[in-house]
Image (tube, rainbow, N blue to C red):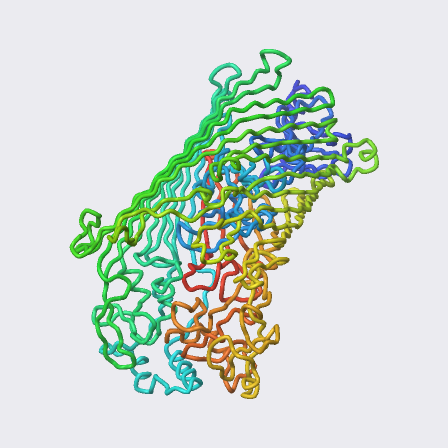
Amino acid sequence: MENKSIIVKEKPAGLPESQVAIIRGIDASGRVVDLENQPLPGVTVKLKGTAKVVITDANGNFLLKDVEKGAELQFSFVGYVTQVHKVDGSEFIRITLKPSVEMMNELVVVGYARQKRAHLTAAVSQVSAKELTRAPMQNLSNMLTGKLPGLTSIQSSGKPGADGTALYVRGLNSFAGNNGPMILVDGVPRPIDNVNPNDVESVSVLKDAAAAIYGVQGANGVILITTKKGEAGAAKIFYNGAGVLTQNTAMPDYLNATDYMYWNNKARELDGLTPMWNAAIQNKVLSNDANSIYGETDWLNKIFRTGVAQQHNVSASGGTEKSKYFASLGVMNQEGTLINTGFKRYNVRTNLDVEVARNLRLTAGLAGLRSDRKWPGVPIGNQTEFDPIRQAVSTIPIIKSEYNGLPTAWQGSAYNVNGYAALTESGFINQTRWTMDTNFQLEYDFSDLSPVLKNLKVSMFGAYNYSNTTDANYSKYYELYSLNNNLDEGIVGASGFSQDNAFSKSASWGDSYLWRPQVDYSRDFGKHYVGAMFLFETKKSYSETMTGSKRGYVTDDPVDLSLGSTFGTTPVSGSHVFSGGQASYVGRLNYGYDNKYLAEAAFRYDGSYIFAPGNQWGFFPSASLGWVVSNEDFFAKSSSAINLLKLRASAGRSGNDAVSPFQHNSLFALASNSMVLGGEAVSQFYSISPYLYRNLRWSTTDNYNIGLDIDLWNGKLGIEADVFYKLTKDILESQGGNYPSSLGGYYPSFKNSGKVENKGFEVILKHANRIGQDWNYAVKGSFAFARNKVLSRIIVDNRPNYRAAIGESMGARYGYEALGLFQSQSEIDNYPAAPSGFLRLGDLKYRDVNGDGIISSEFDYVKTGYGQIPEINFALNLDLSYKNFYVSALWQGASNVDYELAGVFDTGVTSSTLYTSPFGGNGNSPSYLIEQAWTPDHTNAQYPRLSTVSNGNNAWQSTWWVVNGEYLRLKNLNIGYDVPENLLRKMPFSRVNIFVSGTNLLTFSHFKYVDPESPSVSNGYYPQQKTYSFGLNVTF
């Protein structure tokens, strides 16, 4: 048939029937079954290189017509290894699909090795590069949010170059020292955000006894990052790039000029004061007279903008089985939403895998990083009065931002400030950082020397890290034209930030190295499997810092320490040197029988410089068991729906030495004052630090876990569940308050005494399927709960009991129990003595818990809420594809978490928050805070009365200010399209992908004016970012 016409031709004479069949094609038919010879319906059978596709029926049968002899058929099904079969036309095609690598033989990175998932007996979560890069982000730590159950992530800032995420594995274990996990990149401790996310192959999290193999640093879990290696084959070049727009996720609206003057006058009336903003001033503000300093300014709009970022990555991979390589180059340039802030990062990485001789293999890696941070001279996010964000939110909106050629300010404010000028006139803070990381491994396989030595491998691993950081801070003197209270005139004065031009510079550098000889052995003896590993590891590190500063600079360009003036000033310099080391012996033994019964035992013997001789070494054992019930004969015969049922149990001990070193030593320091010796003053002498406790040791964490893994219906549904219990003992605590002051500080200042338990559970549900020929979808949901409780800690005589929090969670909030707002004078007259302030109608009242007639924090504080680390974390990953289109979404959230607005109703910039007190320091205020405040006409109010004067009573921590911090947010959304292969045949590309993506696009929470991951409501906090990305992935 051609052009709707039927053409009939005579069969050529003498043409054999078999050749006719070749011309018209072969009817390829067959059946697809699994390993148990059961039919597999729904398998996709595709003729490679074409769009021709059929699906197997309920009996696993298929028929594909008009297939040329020699063509290739591709058989694919969710949960099974894809197979390719070449058609020769001579037989009925029978295909047996095997369960996929993901189901049975996926290699999971664990401590010092890779294990098949089927052999795992511990609680280990892993995420692949494909899952990580669905939504591009600037930092690897941010990309882990919602991807690994049991891993809590909190991104507390959006500051360029400092917007990484704080990570916690299964909650908190200690109220002293660090609660963050140990992080290793290719087996070496390295910062997570030094890694280019595009270089990552996988990320694993060791959550239970599996972390004990890292001993003294494994108490808080371990994150293992593996970078990409080369793949044998023709060279492939990959490019991916994106342009990104960023905005603040949450920010309250502040009063405009008209509303500010109205509500400020209203508040002064409630204070019994005369209104400040009369009609004449209001007219000047609204008329925006060029000859007046008065005029309306939206200060937040002046300092914030839509940020722009771009990132580009090029990588190459290829080689032979004897020599493989991977190389990459990445560039990222980010402009912050706050003006005059930015960050640049350059990454380079090379990984080689070479067979240098028979059975001798060398793997080597080299990675480099350069980063440049740009900030104004005024520190950002430091929560001081000079923070430009604090200045902007607290400055009145009724003056112009500039007047008479100078930035403006108002002398009636707590400080002579201008947030916009602080960003543009205050100088600069620049940081440049260089790092170089190298590692190599030389491994010899003895398998060919003797059957007895089969799978015996000996290796030597070495690594070297170097870093160099330079910080330059130029604090520039600048002047402001300040409105003289409410008079229409001004004076020129210093900003208050710096009295002259000052410059400081610091340089820090350091290196570390690691050596690790290792022996590995694994062998199958019939139904028995045995594996063993032993290694010795030694690490040393060194760092040095030098600083210097001068004042009195007369020029801004160039700025250098050699150009500063010494007249009338004292140059400041300093230095610091540090050196430390660690040694470890590590061993592990694995046993398996008939793929049914699994066992593992491991130990680590650690030595650390942190503590005194006699307490420098510790032993950390672990053990785990597994039972693959689904491989039992009785189970396989009784259940066809369950493909995998495995039970796991583990127990182990790990340690935590993340405390300040050398606390067991007495330290000498040059005294800053003078002393009298022999009747003469001695100005230069050394002092000795107080007596310190020499029996200090690391805390230990005992970790217990029970879990199960289930796969059903050939991988269409997967379930993982774990229940855990952790007990941390010997937590290091200060006990200064237990000794009289007459001792002068010469007493044991620390003691190993604290004890904390942590328990919870995790559940993961996974489902994937195909609908018809073109639709594919996958759903993965996770839910994790972790709750800690303080079992014991030192009770100091002068510490209120609530501070000890025994029996409660670490970080739990405490304060007064608020009973509401005073609505009558009789309530005030009958109220116990207030904690502070003069009480009026509309002020907060608190419960006298112990009934002594006095409201005091020592006896009347109660638990008011959860801490800022959520006890519950949940996530839902959704993937949907249709032909060449796909959509990927990650919903992520948290619960059992609170934050607090305490301090909101205090006065002055120094004590106000982002939700600053009503007219604190006579500054501006968020609209919601004013419009929902108590007035005589609005007594059923959400917030206390308005005031322009100090009101400490309403600022106390209490139940009134605790906000439920639970939230649900659309963390990532990625929509993409793969250009069809047939359109690329004449181009140098094998794959072209176009995508748009976003992060933090939607957030549902109880308080819309603050991002739910914010560390506090201080107005020094740099808001988190909402991003919109437009990108391209190309493979050459």
Coordinates of residue 593 in the picture (x, y in percent): 73, 27
Residue 795 in sight in this render = yes
Identify the residue at horizontal 43%, vertical 38% (top origin): 239
User: Residue 1017 location, x and y as percent?
Assistant: 47, 64
Whether residue 19 is situated above or below residue 980 in the rendered picture: above
Q: Residue at x 49, y 84 (%)?
A: 840
Instruction: Tell me how many marks there are.
Output: 0
> Residue 706, image x and y in percent?
70, 42
User: Where, by quadrant of the figure, is residue 594 drawn?
Assistant: top right
- Residue lying furthest top: 449
Report the residue that reaches farthest toward the front: 678
Residue 973 seen anywhere in this rendered image of the structure: no
Above or below, 347 relative to 814: above
Q: Is residue 918 above or below residue 243?
A: below
Identify the residue at horizontal 59%, vertical 59% (top origin).
805
Identify which residue, 797 or 963, lies in the foreground: 797
Q: Nearer the viewer, residue 408 or 943?
A: 943
Q: Quadrant of residue 1003?
A: bottom right
The quarter of the picture where the N terminus appears is top right
Q: Quadrant of the C terminus?
A: top left
Residue 85 in picture, x, y percent from top left = 65, 26
Q: Is residue 486 above or below residue 175?
A: below
